[in-house]
Every structure is written in C-alpha cells, then in structure tokens.
Image (tube, rainbow, N blue to C red):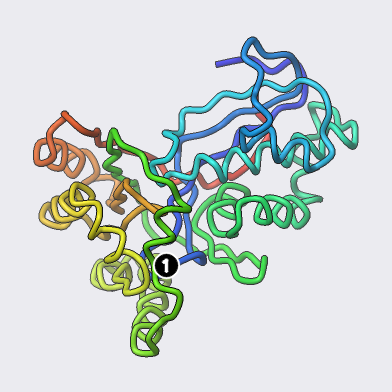
Amino acid sequence: MREPAGPAVVVPGSSANLGPGFDVLAMAVGVHVRMGLGSDEGELSDRHPARVAFLAAGGRGDVWFESDIPSGRGLGFSGAAIVAGTIMGMIAREGVGMLDVDAFIERHGDEILDRAATIEGHPDNVAASLHGGVIAVADRTVIDLPLGFAARLAVWVPSSSTSTAKSRATLGTTVDRVDAVFNLGRALLLAEGLRSGDRRLLRLGVDDRLHQDARLAVAPRSKAAMDAFEECGAVAVWLSGSGPSVAALTTVDESAAVVEWVRVAMGDHDGRVMELAIDASGARQAT
C-alpha cells in the first residue's frame, strides 16, 4: 500500500440495488480504492473510470491509483473509482492541501455526488461510496439508513465478471403495478429491519420483482450461491449490484460459520467467499 506524499483519498466499494431498492438502496463495503496526486509507474488510461472522472472535474497532472475491489463483480469498483477521481480532480483544480481533504469532501459533497452520478449513470453505488453506511437516494438526495445491530457481510465473488450495461439490457423497460407495489412494501420492511435488527423483516425485505430474477436466470452459479446462503440461515441475501456476486447480511457472531458453509457448498473452482465489514465512513483522506 502506497504512503501518500500529497493529497489522496480512500473510497469504499458498495453493494447496490439492495434487494428491492433498484438504483435506490446501497451499502458501503470494506474493500477500497485509493487515489492521490503524484506520479505512478503505471499510468491510467484515459478510459479508466477514475481518470475519466478526474479530468471531468478539472483535474490535471499525474495521479496514482490502487484497488482491492474486484472489477466487474457487482461490488462497486467503477462507482468507487469515479468518486475517487471526482474528488481528486476537484482537489487538484482547487489546490487543496493533503491535510484538508476531509473538510473539502464534507463541504463539496453535493457537487461530488452530482458529478459522480452523472458519469456512473445511476446514483446508488456512488452515494454509498461517498457517504458510507447504508443509504437511500432519490433525485440526488441521500439519507442514511440506521443499522441497529452489529452486522457483517458475507459475499460470494465468482471468478467471472459481468458488464453492468449488458446486465441492465436484460431488464424490461416497464414495470407491472403489482410488482411496483410489491417492491415498495419490501423496501419499507427492509428499512425497518435494518433499524431494528428484526430477522423476519430483513429476510422478507430483500425480496424483489424488478431485477434479480431476470439477472439470476442467466447466472446459475449466482442463483446457487444465493440458495446456499439462504440454506445456512444468513439473515438476508441479495444479488450485489448487477451481479454476479451475491451478498448476505449476517451478525458478527454468525459470519464466520456462514462464510465456511457457503465456501464448502460452492467449492473453490470458480469463486471465493469474502467476509467484509460495512464501511461506515465513506470517502475520506488516505493515510
């Protein structure tokens, strides 16, 4: 891990489209990108999402970039990279010092979100990466959803990747009213379950009729991982982002057992199971 010699940020990944909250609900997760001003041995291409965002925000000059977020797996790599690039572009444009990064992010949060969401095309994952914790977002307005118990995430991450654009293309362009009502109800149950820790509400609250079934239909291993998490008693299970990763909410006490159960059930030949914290801090100064 590089020790910053100038302004730099660390930004968490995310698990977005949380259950019924398509493009609305997301949580920040404990894998990260780091980006700062200064030279790098491997220059970012102009197509890299961090570089695109950096230039769009007015940044000029050399930057370095590191990531431990698996790309194309539904854990918010592009969103985190875009948030990092946006922040660093604005910092380079304004000449912000390395000790003033956190205050700058707090003052300019609305602009950061607006720029990042415009590039990403939807706001939920970039909002979670920027704010941390569990969030809901609509019309670029973000609220924090309280989490009322000590939680961890278990995530099955396959070896294969998926394209968000291609995955979205499998979804219909209209929604049946019955399905819309179903998802509205489940989203409310999920919010209350997160606040209270009520396992029944959490399990019901991640049900979805807008996107998960269509995506799982072309991802049988993701469906198998979801079934494995449910069979071992994980609190709540959902397709992370556009997939193919599958995330499960667990308690701190149960997390290790859930990870081991799913690891054995799925095997090691085409994926791995990760235990992750929920990142409550969001984008911040890298140290």
Q: Residue furthest bottom?
A: 177
In the rendering, at what x and y percent does residue 191 appear?
A: 42, 71
Q: Which residue appears at 69% of the width and 38% of the height?
A: 52
Image quarter where the N terminus lies is top right
Asked which quadrant contains residue 158, the reply is: top left
250 lies above or below 271: below
170 lies above or below 275: below
In the rendering, at what x and y percent does residue 205 appear?
A: 32, 72
Q: Viewed as shown, does residue 197 lie left or right of 120?
A: left
Asked which quadrant contains residue 176, the reply is: bottom left
Q: Which residue appears at 54% of the width and 66% of the height?
A: 136
Say what secondary structure mark 1 lies in: helix
Q: Residue furthest right?
A: 94
In the rendering, at what x and y percent does residue 282 appear?
A: 59, 45
158 lies above or below 106: above
Q: Which residue appears at 39% of the width and 65% of the height?
A: 194
Q: Viewed as shown, does residue 287 lie left or right of 68?
A: right
Asked which quadrant contains residue 46, the reply is: top right
**Category of crowding for the residue at label 1, using alpha-carbon neighbours closer than 10 angstroms: few (below 14), some (14–19), many (at least 20):** some
Task: Name the residue nearer the viewer: 199 or 60.
Answer: 60
Q: Which residue appears at 60% of the width and 71% of the height?
A: 138
Instruction: Name the amino acid, label 1.
Output: Arg
Image quarter where the C terminus lies is top right
Label 1 sits on residue: 195
In the rendering, at what x and y percent does residue 226 appear?
A: 20, 54
Task: Name the residue nearer the viewer: 139 or 260.
Answer: 139
